[in-house]
Image (tube, rainbow, N blue to C red):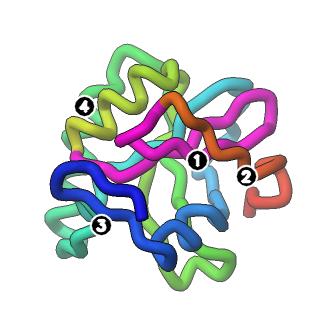
């Protein structure tokens, strides 16, 4: 289990984080980018309305960089969270994620997908090629 102050990532949550699929709402040509959300801080479920408000606040923080909305979920999108792909550094993405109380982010470098736990951002967990995860 990974812990950070009021955050815990148990095995089932880690498994869910490790098997994501992505639906981009428009063409995205960046080579290096983060995928971040403001939904469900520290994995505490909130209403869609609360999540949309938080995500709008996150979007306001992205005004100076290129970004695109992306839906992140399981293989069949039975579970999903509205997110943003954004052309920022790992450090900036983790800073934003911490501000919005997120456990982790995804980062893509040259089509390789990584899971980064905000409590330990120097460790990048390789999840493989993102292309088979694009739907």
The residue that label 2 is drawn on is 127
- N-term-proximal mark, 2 vs 1: 1
Residue visible at 69% across and 39% down in the picture: 27
Magenta residues? Answer: 101-121
With 131 as the anchor, is 88 left or right in this view? left
Name the residue nearer the viewer: 92 or 27.
92
Q: Residues within 10 Å of mark 2 (few under 14, many from 20)?
A: some
- Residue at mark 2 to residue at mark 3: CA–CA distance: 20 Å
The residue that label 4 is drawn on is 60
* Residue 69 inside the magenta-drawn segment: no
- Residue at mark 2 to residue at mark 1: CA–CA distance: 7 Å
* Residue 110 inside the magenta-drawn segment: yes
The residue that label 1 is drawn on is 115
Give the structural element (helix, strand or loop) at label 1: strand
Residues at discs 4 and 1 in contact (Cβ within 8 Å): no
Q: Residues within 10 Å of mark 1 (few under 14, many from 20)?
A: many
Residue visible at 53% across and 84% down in the picture: 78
- Residue at mark 1 to residue at mark 3: CA–CA distance: 16 Å
Q: Residues within 10 Å of mark 4 (few under 14, many from 20)?
A: few
Image coords of residue 116 (percent x, y):
52, 42
Name the residue nearer the viewer: 11 or 81.
11
Q: Which quarter shows the C terminus?
A: bottom right
Q: Residues within 10 Å of mark 3 (few under 14, many from 20)?
A: some
- Residue at mark 4 to residue at mark 1: CA–CA distance: 24 Å
The residue that label 3 is drawn on is 43
Residue visible at 58% across and 51% down in the picture: 25
- N-term-proximal mark, 1 vs 3: 3
Furthest-top residue in this view: 64
Image coords of residue 29 (percent x, y):
73, 29
């Amino acid at each position: 289990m990974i812990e950070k102050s009021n955050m815990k990532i148990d095995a089932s949550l880690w498994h869910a984080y490790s098997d994501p699929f992505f639906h981009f709402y428009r063409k995205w040509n960046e080579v290096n980018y983060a995928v971040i959300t403001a939904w469900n801080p520290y994995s505490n479920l909130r209403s869609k309305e609360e999540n949309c408000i938080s995500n709008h606040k996150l979007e306001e923080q992205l005004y100076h960089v290129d970004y695109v909305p992306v839906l992140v979920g399981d293989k069949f999108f039975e579970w999903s969270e509205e997110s943003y792909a954004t052309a920022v550094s790992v450090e900036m993405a983790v800073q934003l994620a911490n501000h919005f109380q997120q456990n982790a982010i995804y980062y893509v470098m040259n089509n390789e997908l990584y899971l980064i736990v905000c409590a330990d951002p120097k460790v990048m967990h390789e999840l493989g090629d993102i292309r088979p995860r694009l739907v």
